[in-house]
Amino acid sequence: MPYLDLASHRLHYRIDGDTHDSQSKPWLIFCNSLGTDLHMWDAQVAGLWQHFRMLRYDRRGHGLSSAPPPPYGLADLGNDVLALLDALQIRRAHFCGLSIGGLTGQWLGIHAGHRLGNIALCATSAKIGTAESWIARSDAVRESGLATLTAATAERWFTPSFNAVEPGTVGKVLDSFVATSIDGYVGCCAALAGADLREDIERIANPLLAVSGDDDPVCPPADLEDITVRVQRGRHLSLPGRHIVNIESTRAFNGALLEFFDSRY
């Protein structure tokens, strides 16, 4: 398994895609939500592998990546992406991030937009929750762990019908949630507590697609619409589902990405 060793931690990553004439395929990097690993994008890889060279990675403190001591800032998470791009000699890549992954994409669009092509921001906001709510979440996780949050997480992340019809899929996502290191989760809660990009995203000039889950209680469609109003070249698409909309509406989500990520960038 490939890793990138950095000064304070190591990042686990994976490259997928069509190996035939791969140099002609554009790069697409996926950035996960809080409490998930790179397998949250398995359905996207399965549906899009012929069209892209895809880079997935486990955020610091998640999956098989190590966890440096918290707290983390949003700049730390963004610079991890740039370190991966540099190490793999990827000059430019399309970007797709969900939730905190979408915040990471916004930071990159503001500070390193020239390294990105088109940007898809999914189930996210320029400011997610409040500092007080993230501090309270961190305290609860420190005290009781992540397993106590699985029922509430399943309810926030997936609609009741999807929970009922796809219990195996939901179970795999929750398994990765519980496996997240406490330091990694708490560190990212600190990044979320301090992140407010509502003014700065006006500087994003990349073509941007904001994808919402139409029943998402975490980042409702209005939050994604607000992003598109603030950036220079944005449009909004709402799909059936809650927070992990890429899994709940896989086919429509993959179709939207394929249409949006035109290779001519």
Image (spheres, rainbow, N blue to C red):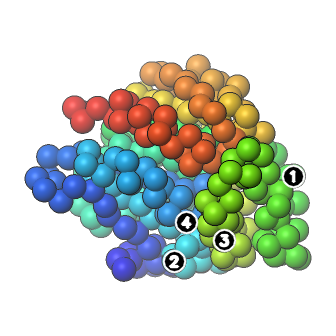
Asked if disc 3 and disc 4 are in contact, CB closer than 8 Å, the reply is: no
The residue shown at (37%, 63%) is 84
Q: Which type of secondary structure does the marked residue at label 1 adopt?
A: helix
In screen coordinates, is 164 left or right of 106?
A: right
Ranked by sequence position, the earlier of labels 2 and 4 is 4
Q: Which residue is mark 1?
A: 132
Q: In the current view of this chain or complex, which residue is farthest to the left? A: 21
The residue shown at (35%, 30%) is 259
Q: Which residue is mark 2?
A: 64
Amino acid type, label 2: Leu
Ranked by sequence position, the earlier of labels 1 and 3 is 1
Ranked by sequence position, the earlier of labels 4 and 1 is 4
Look at the image and tell me whether residue 128 can be seen. Answer: no
Q: Which residue is mark 3?
A: 175
Q: Is the C terminus in the top left, top right, bottom left or bottom right quadrant?
A: top left
Measured in 3D between alpha carbons, the distance from the residue under mark 3 to the one under mark 4, in whole angstroms, is: 10 Å
Amino acid type, label 4: Asp
Marks 4 and 1: which is nearer the front? 4
Asked if disc 3 and disc 2 are in contact, CB closer than 8 Å, the reply is: no
Q: Nearer the viewer, residue 8 or 46?
A: 46
Badge 4 density bin: few <14, some 14–19, many ≥20, Cα 10 Å: many
Amino acid type, label 3: Asp
Asked if disc 2 and disc 4 are in contact, CB closer than 8 Å, the reply is: yes
Q: Which type of secondary structure does the marked residue at label 4 adopt?
A: loop
Amino acid type, label 1: Glu
Badge 3 density bin: few <14, some 14–19, many ≥20, Cα 10 Å: some
